[in-house]
Image (cartoon, rainbow, N blue to C red):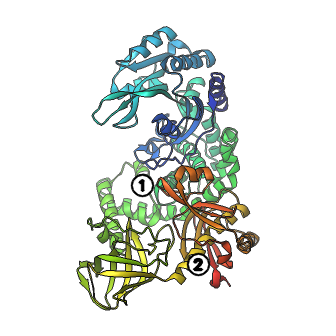
């Protein structure tokens, strides 16, 4: 039974049992603690923990997952055995307060033995050591005596506290001829019975609703159903590795099998992640995908192939998996362009880095590469540490990891020292609990504030004099501190009716607003000052910010709905806007975008500013900034019926106030990311 047939059989079976069939959630989880969706339960975490209401009592799905970053990392093992994958598919059926142990166990046994036809004698089950109920159900359903296991093996929990419960696992016997027990008996299904809530004292309290959370790896099922011990010998991977042979002109042998496995596995991880909106980069999940892509390229070099690899293999991925995951087809052009850009940019770095590495290898006399050399490969040539380790593993050479980390930390310290501003100093001021800037949307409001702290030349002082360049924190302010891509306000502080400080910029460190500028007279901690904003520049910045929202809306109409903001800088009458797109815009597309923005400006659409709950904003269809975290209460900016976004910036109230918009330049700033600079208002005219 092939992969596509297994998926359909699984979902059809549970649909016949009254389950709602849902598509896979994105690989980008709605969970700030995770880089990727690492398990089938991640999309249902809120329901399972009782913080979200279930939309159906029974659900079944096939969830795409990646384990290649953070604490969930299988990357280093891929290619060296037959079981590890960076990308995998998790079959799951879920009961949210509906059926429980008996039905879950009966469904598992019926599907495996009756529908899929597995030999019951090849199956072994385990239960939690005190779970008499599950053990008795197994006796009744299968006639088997379950093997009892302890907390380490058969107890699931979301953490030290919260929902938890016993689980029962089903193992398949690959045969007595396999010496390693872990290879012989392979887990193919896990039913978790979430029935308790563990409190801070370790007490188990019954949950008001008991849930069933199951997981079964599709790759393992395919191996079992196709009579293979190695997952990579199943139909999907055989097809992908055949495509690698055709592309490289190299036949798979026992000596190069690990490279074929790496490339086939990494093709899935990279292709699916980019299709879901992950852009290769130097941070977070983008860095993980870049590492995976570069690791695949290194293994193509091992095979002797120097050209583009994954971008040319992607159509084969669509052939094998596009029916089950239509987003692969829909995003093909975008994904291929991004992979090609990455491959082209890394090719020269890889060749130059290898030259350096070969030179340094000649100097090694203790089979250990110095850490500073490994760091140079990382810093100059983009070699992640694990890539260097993989290359050297072939030569039985280790890396001085401690030395690498020392060099990395030294660079971070240099970076901190070179960073403009004084963020670290302000973060050290624990007595400053924050600035009340609740009136920042009312620039004309007259506000008398108290000076809480003065920073001069990297030192906190009680008093500063005329001509001193300082940073001032007040107890309250109506200045907008730089945030969310919008530059901070400028203006002045007055004392006793006279200007005491010219404020060049208001910035922000966490919840503290910092007024930067030059004093015209003596100022002391504790003095009372009047805050006066440059309202003309504030208005210019506000219209530029609203224009940035119109720009994003226009790009999504002219290019496609999947264009997403990846950064911005909004200054008086000037917009810099970064967005995800895999190629340069044509002259016609740029003109159409500009014309659409100016059309909306000429229509003088109303711009509303509303505060509401995050849930209400989502229901309203408000667009959120990619990767941004939001509180329970958010501000929603709506321009007519063309734009609706979550935004804490300052904005105008009618689009006509923008006057005019002019796109000046559009260019690439990194793989899959474009940048537009645009003038508005008097600058555009």
Instruction: Answer few, some or many: residues within 10 Å of disc 2's Cα (few below 14, many 20 plus, some between 14 and 19).
Output: many
Q: State the image coordinates of residue 617 (x, y, percent, origin top left).
A: 57, 53
| Residue 139 shows in this picture | yes
Kindly identify which numbered label has been placed on residue 574: 2
Q: State the image coordinates of residue 647 (x, y, percent, origin top left).
A: 54, 63
Q: Quadrant of the C terminus?
A: bottom right
Residue at image coords 50%, 34%: 82
Q: Is residue 495 left or right of residue 623?
A: left
Lower sequence index among marks 1 and 2: 1
Q: Is residue 373 left or right of residue 137?
A: left
Residue at image coords 66%, 22%: 16
Between 158 and 451, the residue placed more toward the observer is: 451
Between 316 and 571, the residue placed more toward the observer is: 571
The image quarter in which residue 565 lies: bottom right
Kindly identify which numbered label has been placed on residue 214: none
Instruction: Answer few, some or many: residues within 10 Å of disc 1's Cα (few below 14, many 20 plus, some between 14 and 19).
Output: many
Q: Quadrant of the N terminus?
A: top right
> Vertically, is 223 above or below 449?
above
Between 45 and 590, the residue placed more toward the observer is: 45
Q: State the image coordinates of residue 176 (x, y, percent, origin top left).
A: 45, 17
Would you name the residue on which mark 1 appears?
388
The image quarter in which residue 224 lies: top right
| Residue 663 shows in this picture | no
Residue at image coords 38%, 68%: 436
Q: Is residue 323 left or right of residue 437?
A: right
> Vertically, is 537 above or below 59?
below
> Vertically, is 64 above or below 372?
above
Q: State the image coordinates of residue 421 (x, y, percent, origin top left).
A: 36, 75
Give the residue furthest to the left: 462
Is label 1 in contact with label 2 (beta carbons under 8 Å)? no
């Amino acid at each position: 039974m092939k992969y596509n047939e297994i998926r359909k059989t699984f979902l059809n079976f549970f649909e016949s049992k009254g389950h709602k069939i849902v598509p896979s959630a994105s690989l980008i989880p709605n969970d700030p603690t995770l880089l990727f969706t690492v398990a089938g339960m991640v999309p249902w975490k809120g329901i399972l923990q009782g913080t979200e209401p279930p939309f159906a009592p029974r659900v079944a799905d096939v969830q795409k997952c990646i384990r290649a970053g953070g604490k969930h990392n299988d990357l280093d093992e891929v290619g060296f055995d037959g079981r590890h994958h960076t990308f995998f598919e998790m079959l799951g059926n879920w009961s949210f307060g509906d059926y429980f142990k008996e039905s879950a166990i009966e469904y598992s046994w019926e599907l495996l033995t009756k529908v899929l036809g597995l030999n019951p004698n090849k199956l072994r089950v385990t239960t939690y050591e005190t779970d008499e109920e599950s053990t008795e159900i197994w006796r009744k359903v299968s006639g088997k005596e379950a093997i009892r296991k302890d907390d380490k093996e058969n107890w699931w929990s979301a953490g030290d506290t919260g929902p938890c419960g016993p689980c029962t696992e089903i193992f398949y016997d690959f045969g007595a001829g396999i010496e390693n027990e872990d290879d012989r008996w392979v887990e193919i299904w896990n039913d978790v019975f979430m029935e308790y809530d563990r409190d801070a004292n370790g007490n188990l309290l019954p949950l008001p609703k008991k849930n069933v959370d199951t997981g079964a790896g599709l790759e393992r099922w395919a191996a079992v159903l196709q009579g293979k011990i190695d997952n990579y010998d199943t139909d999907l991977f055989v097809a992908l590795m055949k495509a690698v042979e055709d592309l490289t002109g190299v036949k798979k042998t026992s000596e190069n099998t690990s490279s074929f496995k790496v490339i086939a596995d990494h093709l899935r991880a990279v292709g699916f992640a980019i299709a879901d909106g992950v852009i290769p980069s130097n941070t977070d999940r983008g860095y993980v995908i870049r590492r995976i892509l570069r690791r695949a390229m290194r293994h193509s070099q091992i095979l002797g192939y120097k050209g583009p690899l994954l971008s040319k293999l992607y159509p084969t991925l669509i052939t094998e998996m596009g029916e089950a995951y239509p987003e692969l087809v829909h995003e093909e052009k975008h994904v291929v362009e991004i992979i090609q850009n990455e491959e082209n940019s890394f090719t020269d770095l890889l060749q130059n880095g290898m030259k350096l590495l070969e030179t340094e290898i000649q100097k090694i006399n203790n089979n250990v590469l110095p850490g500073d050399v490994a760091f140079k490969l990382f810093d100059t040539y983009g070699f992640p540490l694990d890539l260097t380790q993989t290359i050297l593993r072939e030569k039985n050479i280790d890396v001085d990891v401690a030395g690498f980390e020392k060099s990395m930390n030294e660079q971070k310290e240099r970076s901190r020292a070179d960073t403009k501003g004084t963020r670290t100093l302000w973060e050290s001021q624990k007595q400053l609990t924050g600035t009340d800037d609740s009136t920042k949307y009312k620039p004309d409001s007259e506000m008398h504030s108290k000076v809480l702290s003065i920073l001069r030349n990297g030192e906190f002082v009680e008093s500063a004099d005329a001509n001193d360049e300082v940073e001032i924190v007040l107890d309250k302010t109506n200045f907008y501190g730089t945030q969310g891509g919008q530059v901070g306000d400028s203006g002045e502080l007055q004392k006793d009716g006279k200007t005491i400080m010219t404020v060049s910029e208001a910035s922000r460190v966490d919840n503290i607003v910092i007024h930067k500028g030059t004093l015209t007279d003596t100022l002391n901690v504790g003095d009372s000052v009047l805050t006066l904003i440059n309202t003309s520049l504030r208005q210019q910045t506000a219209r530029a910010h609203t224009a940035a929202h119109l720009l994003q809306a226009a790009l999504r109409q002219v290019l496609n709905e999947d264009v997403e903001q990846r950064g911005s800088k909004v200054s008086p009458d000037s917009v810099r806007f970064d967005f995800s797109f895999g190629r340069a815009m044509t002259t016609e597309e740029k003109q159409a975008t500009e014309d659409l923005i100016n059309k909306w400006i000429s229509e003088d659409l109303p711009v509303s500013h509303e505060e509401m709950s995050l849930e209400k904003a989502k229901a309203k269809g408000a667009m959120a900034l990619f990767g941004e975290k939001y509180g329970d209460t958010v501000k929603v900016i709506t321009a007519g019926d063309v734009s609706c976004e979550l935004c804490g910036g300052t904005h105008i109230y009618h689009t006509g106030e923008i006057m005019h918009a002019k796109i000046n330049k559009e260019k690439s700033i990194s793989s899959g990311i474009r940048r537009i600079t645009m003038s508005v208002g008097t600058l555009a005219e």
